[in-house]
Image (cartoon, grey):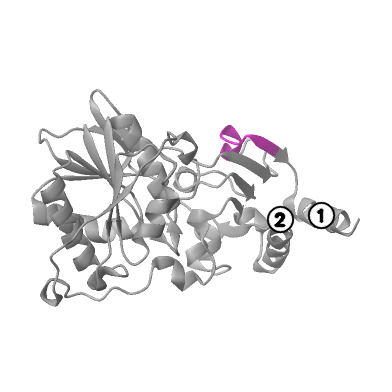
Amino acid sequence: MDILVLLEDNRGSLHRMSKEAIAGAQKMGVTVRALAIGGNAEALAGELSGIDLTEVITVNHGLVSSYNADGYSEVVKQVIQSESPLSIVAGHTYQTRDYIPRLSAKLGIPFIPDIISFGADGFVKQVLNAKLNATVSTSVETFILSFQSAAFSDEDLVPGSCASRPFKVNLDASMVRSETEGPFQEDAGDVDLESAELIISIGRGIEKEGNIPMVFELAEALGAEVSASRPVVDSGWIESFRQVGSSGQTVAPKLYFSLGISGAIQHVVGMKGSKNILSINKDPDAPIFEIADYAVVGDLLEIIPKLIEALQTEKNS
């Protein structure tokens, strides 16, 4: 199967979920190519020089030097019409959700989003807040897929080599009617949960807003980002861009350190792809312990200050 993976630029580097999409595509097909668009396209292609790909196609045009939905959908349409891949694959990011539906409409081919796995019967995605899995199939030859965060691991990328090839597109201003605001993460300043390797996440066990500063102190000592469950965000204790779960962001860090999070399915769906999960909760029967790699039954309000003290002692020794 000939597969084209759509790459995404995340602040000058290849998006983690683009790497995961390549890993998934390598499991699906024999021939895997990638497409990088924008002023940083050659640099993105360079990041993949040690990966087993047929090639990375690059498009650098003034009208798509930075992301906009009209321009990107038109560029991808032209590449698909020229190169004729059977499957088009991407990570299920905010950007993907913005322009892929219009690409699907332009080409008249189906878009199957948020896939977690695939098999002989079709593609598997989660429904009803991840309470059930549904298998989706299509009878058409060409289709578009997006993979859920952490459906595949970038650690499984097949090493090898690949070259890049520039592709000339036919674009003019009449094709780019929309102006796209900055990426979602920019509203969050320097906070980038999707790319973070270490995340400390807080739930209702933090008890009150006044206890949150010590979590940020711990995060600073560990070099971690801070996230939260929906109840903490809904209480107004922390910014909404830090929310993880079915109505927030999906993350897959190397370590997810949960503090006072019970483990409701709506939260778990957003972090279950984490490589390692460390959880502190006073309730020994908390559902989060069922998926945790390391479980600590205790009062986080007593444990966090001791952790901070230990880290400061280690730093000063």
Q: What residue is shown with label 1?
A: 311
Residue at disc 1, secondary structure: helix
Q: Amino acid at mark 1?
A: Leu
Q: Amino acid at mark 2?
A: Leu
Residue visible at 51% across and 72% down in the picture: 189
Front in this rendered view, residue 311 or 280: 311
Left or right relative to 215: residue 73:
left
Tell me the crowding category of disc 1: few under 14, some 14 to 19, or many 20 or more residues within 10 angstroms, Cα based: some
Q: Position of residue 183 (x, y in %)?
A: 38, 68
Q: Is residue 58 magenta?
A: no
The earlier-in-sequence mark between 1 and 2 is 2
Look at the numbered discs 1 and 2 and tell me whether their residues touch, using CB distance below 8 Å. yes
Residue 130 can be seen, yes or no: no
| Residue holding disc 2 | 222
Find numbered disc 2 in the image and state the secondary structure of the residue it sits on: helix
Residue drawn at point x = 44 percent, y = 63 percent: 12
Can you give x and y, in whole percent of width and height, for residue 221 in the image?
74, 59
- Residue 88 at x, y percent in the picture: 23, 44
Q: Give the number of marks.
A: 2
Residue placed at 28% from the left, 65% from the top?
Answer: 60
Q: Residue 187 sits in which quadrant?
A: bottom left
Q: Which residues are magenta?
A: 287-295
